[in-house]
Image (spheres, rainbow, N blue to C red):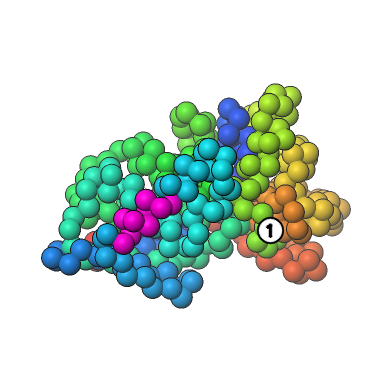
Amino acid sequence: MQTLCSVPAKLILSGEHAVLYDCPALSMAVKLYTQIECHFKPSATHSVTIELTDFKQKHCFPNRVWQNLAMGLESRYQQFLNNNTAIQSVLNQPVDLIIATLHHFDHFHTMKPGEWTFKIHSEVPIGRGLGSSAAVIVGVLSNLIHHHDLDISKETLLALARKIESRQHGQSSGIDPATIIYGGLLEFHAKHITRQHKAHEFKGWLIDTGSPESTTGQAVAHVKQHFADDRDIWNAFKETIQEIIQAWSLQNSQALYKGIRQNQALLEQIGVVPDEVKGFIKQLSIDYQAVAKVCGSGSTKGNHAGILLCFSEKEPTALCAKYGYSCQAISVAYQGALCQVL
């Protein structure tokens, strides 16, 4: 049996970092896809082959080998929880994320014995705040669910994906896998998904400023260290996010632009926006009467912050070219992860 899962990327309009501190968030699934093929053949030889085409890597593990690797990364994750190691040391190489996913699925529902093959290709730039890790996790899990004929709710899938994603980022709010699973435009709270919103009527652009020098886990840890107990900053985030959600619901562009500016100012205050990106956003406002904000974890060092969300009537092509940034129109993915039998 062979299956193929197509998984969209995610874009946070408002609520990155803040969602970990009891604030709501507004996120969107976008049409940048991770494709994961899965082939299973019953066999006395129990093995897993993982082909990562974007990294030009192919790994073949007997069951005992990948399970031992999984136990090793779980041990490192426990060390992270005990404050004895950094989060980036838990998963040492790209294939570790797939191994972690297999391990947790196998605990959830014992995998069929045989030869498993996974082939993964993604249009999503890695480390840009677009949910590339969550897309891989959800895609691998969805394939496994199909192959085992399981009837699993979206809530159960989300809980499992969130647990696995914590091995990558340290503390998963769940917003990435939730957006990818449900699709469309989502209002999200850490304990529940409140509602899905209508598609936007605003002209929006994805601007790639380049890969951040700090990882998501490092940025999350930085914010936790310096601002975890700062109720004033999180109350300000909460008010701003509610204003953005209301502006979106009412299709009020003036209020939306104001909210995006406030949100970006708060992200700058918690130290996740490099100076060069701050300058670019300021110039956007001057040249295009546009607003923009960091959409992922941002960065605590260097010159790059991953993806920016920009609202502007005109595509900011010239300014992006000046900074060496790429730009493309936002296209909403109304369907979440989809699987088919080949």
Q: Is residue 69 magenta?
A: yes
User: Is 24 situated left or right of 267 in this image?
Assistant: left
**Residue 173 vs residue 8, the one in the foreground:** 173
**Residue 135 vs residue 30, the one in the foreground:** 135
* Quadrant that contains the N terminus: bottom left
Q: Where is residue 78 in the image (x, y as percent from the top left)?
A: 47, 42
Q: Which residue lies furthest to the front in this view?
A: 84
- Is residue 198 something that shows in the picture? no
User: Is 339 situated left or right of 314 in this image?
Assistant: left
**Residue at 27 percent of width and 65 percent of height:** 62
What residue is shown with label 1? 213
**Residue at 76 percent of width and 43 percent of height:** 271
Q: How crowded is mark 1: few (under 14 residues within 10 Å), some or many (20 or more)?
A: some
User: Is 218 situated left or right of 58 in this image?
Assistant: right
* Quadrant that contains the C terminus: bottom left
Task: Identify residue type, mark 1.
Answer: Glu
The image shows residue 238, relative to residue 132, as above or below, that is above
Q: Is the stretch drawn in magenta largely helix, strand or loop?
A: helix
- Is residue 283 something that shows in the picture? yes
User: Is 303 situated left or right of 106 in this image?
Assistant: right
Residues shaded magenta: 65-73
The image shows residue 326, relative to residue 234, as above or below, that is below
Q: At numbered mark 1, what does the secondary structure look like: helix, strand or loop?
A: loop
